[in-house]
Image: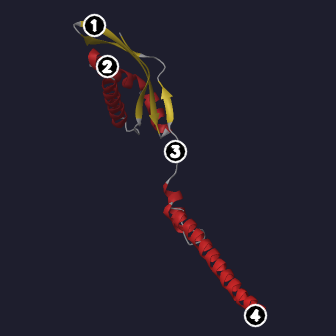
Amino acid sequence: MAQSSTAEAVPARKGKLKLIILIAVALILAIALSIAGTLWFLGDGIPGMGDDVAGENAVAEEVFTPSVYMGIEKALVTTVQGEGRQRYAQVYLSFEAKDPQALTAAKLHLPLIRSQLVTVLGSSSFTELQTPEGRAGLADTMLATVNQVLEQEGEPSINRVLFRNFVVQ
């Protein structure tokens, strides 16, 4: 009888060994599928699966061009009307552009641009210049004015007008 009990124990161990191997293979397969799914959902794709064409197009589309800046050395100073009194406004400006040629053109036509900007600043109201929304509106108006002058001269336009210092009193 002793022999029959050991004979039955050996097949039970082989069955458990097969079950352990099956579970290990299933676990490894689940981990591999999880990694592949994560890579796919994150947009990287599975390495070596022919995504080279899409990657080359993405690189060709996005070319970073840094902005170039030019500061106006002298402040724009003018009077503005506010609450029945004359008030003063002093603004230091800088121009931002992607094309350095636009800043070269702005420097060339700076006397005309300064004159137009002083007119725009002088036509603003004191209460309007005290609010952030009023200053943002003034920057947009100044941008349109500068680009209008540059367009009349046949030059490229600038992207933004930036305030370096802004004082109203």
Give whichever of 155, 31 is nearer the camera.
Answer: 31
* C-alpha separation, residue under disc 4 versus residue under disc 3: 88 Å
Tell me the residue that label 3 is attached to: 65
Q: Secondary structure at mark 2?
A: helix
Q: Residues within 10 Å of mark 3 (few under 14, many from 20)?
A: few
Q: Residues within 10 Å of mark 1 (few under 14, many from 20)?
A: few
Q: Position of residue 10 (x, y in %)?
A: 73, 87
Give whichever of 50, 158 is nearer the camera.
Answer: 50
* C-alpha separation, residue under disc 2 versus residue under disc 4: 105 Å
Give whichever of 86, 106 is nearer the camera.
Answer: 86
Quadrant position of the C terminus in the picture: top left
> Residue visible at 72% across and 86% down?
9
Q: Secondary structure at mark 1?
A: strand
Tell me the residue that label 4 is attached to: 1
Tell me the residue that label 1 is attached to: 86
Q: Quadrant of residue 12?
A: bottom right
> If you read the primary sequence from the N terminus, does the residue marked by circle 4 or circle 1 appear first?
4
Mark 3 is on which residue type? Thr
Q: Do tag 3 and tag 2 residues touch (Cβ < 8 Å)? A: no
